[in-house]
Image (cartoon, grey):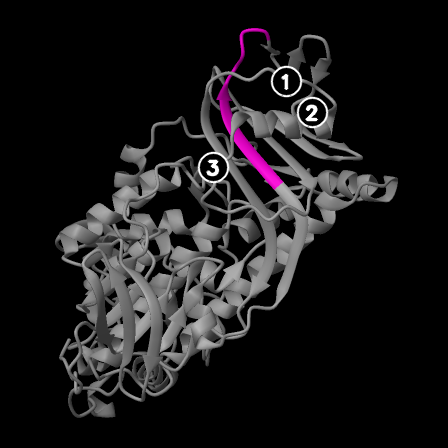
Amino acid sequence: MGSNRMHVTDTDVIIVGAGPTGLMLAAELRLAGVRPLVLERKSQPRDIPKAGGIGGQILELLRYRGLLERCEAANTDPIPAPRFPFGGVHVDLTHLSDPPLHALPLAQHRLERVLAERVRELGADVRRGHEVIAVSQDDATVTAEVRGPDGAYQVTARYLVGCDGGRSRIRDIAGIAFPGTTYPEVNRLVQVAVHDSVTVLDNGDLDVPGFGRIRAGFTQTERGMFANGSTTPGLLGLFTAEDESTEYDDDEPMTLTEFQDSVRRVLGADLPLGEPIRLSRFTFKDRLAERYRAGRILLAGDAAHLFPATGVAINAGMLDTVNLAWKLAADIDGWGPAGLLETYHDERHLAGARTLLHTRAQVALRRGKDPAAEALRQVFQELLLDEQPLRRVGAMIAGTDIRYRLTNPNEHALTGTFAPDLPLYTDQGATSVAELMHTARPILLVLADRPELCAIAREWQHRIEIRTARTDHRPADALLIRPDAHIAWAATIDESIDTAAPALREALSNWFGAPSRTPVPADQLG
């Protein structure tokens, strides 16, 4: 890709925050040929796992980048069965041969190590112990005032992205409203060794001395909720949720005694616990930034959205960055079409709102304590015994049901969706869509004998790759796949060149700018 950097800057993009969102953004920007600088106020990565795993669409995206195997190698826990909490009930996908949702129990600090290693390989600059204390911007650049170990300094860039969490200073500086609700609810989660005095029964129930049996799954009481489950022999996963007005500091670690006190309040039981593996505490907030961009400042991850349920935040945040990075690169390199960067807000705000929808629904299911609420949970659980609603809810949690609202002249069902990982057969051998996406390059994938489509795409071959291949059951004659693996355009089977040609040119221009040479004459396309 050519460069058109008209303003002298210290770097191309400043990223504030070195969590999974910030590190993933840095890696994606480097793949796009852009220079990111990551500034993280903490001097060392945190060892306490803030999140216990990743799941949903991000697992597919990591596979499309060739990173999933690294994540799997860094994981030390067995892969759990596909059974997921949803508002005080369980979404049990174990009976489906192809579940729409999977999880990898990779603790957040291990995920960050994998991503940090990848960022180092790609040559990005990550500075820990460097806190951004002020930001200013003009029409061409953004400047960050930074306090580092050796004193204060300034750094300028074309753009700055706040990946600095739910209490984002960058969001506040940019003046972006963050409306929503903070629930008066504190949630505590532990993974501990089974205490010698506690018996885990075959069905997962616990037999506690002096108290009796605590059933597996969710137990709702007048004082809160308790959950018990285990995927690893010898270990217990335990959870409490109770209304509490205390405002905890996220950096203040939870103790085992604090959790036992919570269990006593919720269940009325003294539950003996073994050695802790993971201790975490969090509150539930329901917030969505009014906009994801203010001039040259953008937001991603928890800085842009907070959801009142577990298991979705990292997925949503990392997917934000994959959508954003190539669009920033297009603008910085000078070839981005008008309005391209605005589509980041349009598409990811839509995805954030969709995630907020189902997590708000979980609040309604989880927090009700009267007989009517219990009846709602029971009816919902019964609905999940049927395959179609079970698949729909699983896809909703995974984020795989997101379809961006793109121009779709032929109403093809794949337009706006995540590209399926088709097995591909070429003259050079077998490959797949996932393998083609490792470099994060846009691709026109032609799956039928359509040389006229390849001829059109060659006008943009300075920006996209053109691949021809065969597949077992082709869903379309051709797919135009963006770097974020979403389909920008698809040709229906045997679609005439008279309709396919202008639609393909429009899609290429909308997403990848002006062609590099004179269009191919119509009489040469047949």
Nearer the observer, 178 or 63: 178
Please name the predominant secondary structure of the magenta segment in the image: strand
Name the side, left or right, on which 483 lies relative to 213: left
The residue shown at (30%, 80%) is 508
Mark 1 is on which residue type? Leu
Name the side, left or right, on which 285 lies relative to 9: right
View extreme (right): residue: 371
C-alpha separation, residue under disc 1 versus residue under disc 2: 8 Å
**Does residue 458 sit above or below 518 in this rendering?**
above
Nearer the observer, 93 or 20: 20
Rendering coords of residue 405 (x, y %): 49, 74
Q: Is residue 143 magenta?
A: no
- Residue 279 visible in the picture: yes
User: What is the magenta range?
Assistant: 187-197
- Residue 449 visible in the picture: no
Rendering coords of residue 94 (x, y %): 55, 32
Q: Can you identify the residue that label 1 sits on?
A: 271
Q: Quadrant of residue 243?
A: top right
Local SS, label 1: loop
Q: Which circle's residue, 1 or 2, is located before the other in the chain?
A: 2
Q: Is residue 196 magenta?
A: yes
Q: Can you identify the residue that label 2 sits on?
A: 264
Q: Are marks 1 and 2 in contact (CB under 8 Å)?
A: yes
Local SS, label 3: loop
Circle 2: is it few (<14), some (14-19), or many (20+) Cα within 10 Å?
Answer: few
Local SS, label 2: helix
C-alpha separation, residue under disc 3 versus residue under disc 1: 20 Å
**Does residue 279 sit above or below 368 in this rendering?**
above
Q: Which circle's residue, 3 or 1, is located before the other in the chain?
A: 3
Q: Can you identify the residue that label 3 sits on?
A: 253
Q: Nearer the viewer, mark 3 or mark 1?
A: 3
Mark 3 is on which residue type? Pro
